[in-house]
Image (spheres, rainbow, N blue to C red):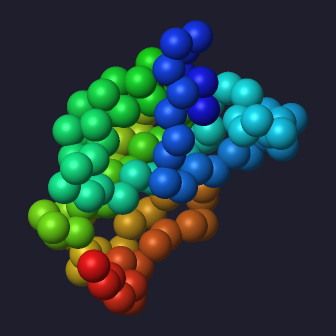
Amino acid sequence: MHADDQIYLEPDISVICDKNKLTDEGCNGAPDWIIEIVSPSSRPMDYNKKLFKYRTAEVREYWIVDYERNLITVYNFEHDEMMDYTFQDKVKAGIYEDLAIDFAGIRMEL
């Protein structure tokens, strides 16, 4: 994802609803939904720099999945909302009517 002319960001998981945005080089424009899986070395980047860049690039929704903190932080930029969840929760995707991820059913191994 090109956040601006100088920086290229590569999310852990991205959902692009408009197939016309996809090129051989990646996504031309902002994905609709991005999920970053936090590692100790990526924590500052995921919580700060990427959050700012994704919001500025008009990503619709951004999730930060932080296993170490038992935390899923969901930013719905379309509605200017932020919610925190745990790995015991079922988290609804804001950009889809009928999609939720049940984190209690996901086995995490480091």
**Residue positioned 83% across, 36% down in the render:** 23
Q: Is residue 44 left or right of residue 21?
A: left
Identify the residue at horizontal 19%, vertical 55% (top origin): 40
Q: Nearer the viewer, residue 86 or 107?
A: 107
**In percent of the image, x 42 and y 44: which residue is there?**
62
Residue at x 76% of width, y 35% of height: 25
Residue 4 at x, y = what percent?
Answer: 54, 14
Q: Nearer the viewer, residue 47 or 101?
A: 47
Q: Is residue 4 above or below residue 25?
A: above
Name above or below for residue 99 compared with residue 39. Answer: below
Viewer can see residue 22: yes
Q: Quadrant of residue 81?
A: top left
Question: Residue 72 in the image: x percent, y percent?
Answer: 27, 60
Say whether residue 101 is left or right of residue 74: right
- x, y (%) of residue 32? 60, 40
- Specify whether 48 is left or right of 5: left
| 34 vs 92, nearest the viewer | 34
Which quadrant of the figure contains the C terminus? Answer: bottom left
Report the quarter where the N terminus lies: top right
Quadrant of the image occupied by residue 37 = bottom left
Q: Is residue 16 above or below residue 93?
A: above
Whole-percent x and y of residue 83? 26, 50
